[in-house]
């Protein structure tokens, strides 16, 4: 057998800088792809009690500075960054100076939201996902989820509809909002037409929060009386505390806040599916993130 000999390939010294630059770019792309792949894999896992939220890299930015924000999925206010996928997005917008603009992301963007610069004031980012489906093979998993989200009567509701206790499906959608202070951060949150939505009734960056931050939770544009709100409070040491409150008859709840802490509010709507076949339940997850100076 004859073995072919391959001579060494010589690279001229003048090309080394360009070669090294290309190598660094390839390493950077690999890291970006690896992180994005992890986010994609996690985004396909069953929702169960996993929250979804918008996490700005900075909640307070200078006027004219870029605004970067991640989409995250996880538990206890800790989760994986999600890359931007248009087919999984029903709505992605930002509102500033009273004007709402559709955000045009690029496939695979990480962070998912990248705005070169924003006007001074309160910037509102909103994101709604396309429906996804999860199948429950056992009743216990669905019961645990429903109990956690404040639907103690789910067993009666399920049985009243004559539904099976295993092998049934649910569709879920996410309805996330985040408040960011640009420059002076002056401005007000407002109802922006998501199916499930939080509206802050005070500005967390400029108003007096000594008594707490009042928020109202909505469903289809109407205040949700007695809605359960799960509050995730993350301190400067990254320790997260979780608590529950119920909205009043007007859908309002007063959130106790501390300076230098970041908050995620979560509220879920659980309703019968509007589809004639397939999934039997729908959940709509409203989320709001902000920080307190």
Image (tube, rainbow, N blue to C red):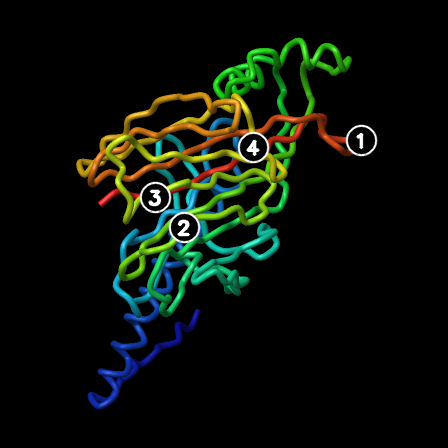
Residue occupied by mark 1: 277
Q: Quadrant of the C terminus?
A: top left
In the rendered structure, which disc, 3 or 4, sits on the residue that comes first in sequence? Answer: 4
Q: Residue at x 63, y 42 (%)?
A: 131
Q: Pick whichever, 122 or 202, lies toward us.
A: 202
* Labels 1 & 2 near each other (Cβ < 8 A): no
Residue occupied by mark 3: 290
Per the model, the C-alpha gap separating discs 3 and 4 is: 21 Å
In the rendered structure, which disc, 1 or 2, sits on the residue that comes first in sequence? Answer: 2
Residue occupied by mark 4: 223
- Relative placement, left or right, of 81 versus 237 is right
Q: Pick whichever, 292 or 70, lies toward us.
A: 292
Q: Secondary structure at mark 1?
A: loop
Q: Is residue 115 above or below residue 249?
A: below
Percent of width and height locating residue 93:
51, 57
In the rendered structure, which disc, 2 or 4, sits on the residue that comes first in sequence? Answer: 2
| Neighbours of disc 3 within 10 Å: few (<14), some (14-19), many (20+) | many
* Labels 3 & 4 near each other (Cβ < 8 A): no
Name which quarter of the figure residue 169 lies in.
top right
Percent of width and height locating residue 47:
52, 32
């Amino acid at each position: 057998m004859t073995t072919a000999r391959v001579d060494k390939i010589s690279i001229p010294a003048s090309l080394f800088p360009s070669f090294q630059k290309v190598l660094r770019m390839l390493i950077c792309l690999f890291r970006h792809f690896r992180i994005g792949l992890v986010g994609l894999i996690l985004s396909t896992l069953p929702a169960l009690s996993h929250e979804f939220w918008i996490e700005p890299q900075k909640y307070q930015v200078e006027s004219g500075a870029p605004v970067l924000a991640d989409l995250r999925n996880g538990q206890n206010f800790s989760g994986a960054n999600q890359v931007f996928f248009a087919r999984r997005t029903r709505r992605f917008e930002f509102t500033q100076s009273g004007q709402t603009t559709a955000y045009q992301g690029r496939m695979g963007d990480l962070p998912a939201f990248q705005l070169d610069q924003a006007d001074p004031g309160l910037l509102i980012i909103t994101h709604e996902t396309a429906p996804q489906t999860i199948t429950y093979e056992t009743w216990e998993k669905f019961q645990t989820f429903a109990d956690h989200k404040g639907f103690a009567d789910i067993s009666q509701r399920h049985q009243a509809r004559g539904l099976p206790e295993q092998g049934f499906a649910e569709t879920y959608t996410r309805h996330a909002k985040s408040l960011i202070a640009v420059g002076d951060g002056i401005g007000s949150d407002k109802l922006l037409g998501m199916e499930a939505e939080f509206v802050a009734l005070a500005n967390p960056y400029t108003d007096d929060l000594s008594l707490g931050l009042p928020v109202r939770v909505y469903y289809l544009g109407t205040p949700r009386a007695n809605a359960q709100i799960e509050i995730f409070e993350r301190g400067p040491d990254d320790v997260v505390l979780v608590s529950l409150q119920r909205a009043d008859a007007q859908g309002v709840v007063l959130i106790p806040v501390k300076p230098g802490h970041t908050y995620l509010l979560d509220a879920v709507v659980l309703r019968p599916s509007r589809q004639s076949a397939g999934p039997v339940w729908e959940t709509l997850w409203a989320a709001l993130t902000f920080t307190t100076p």
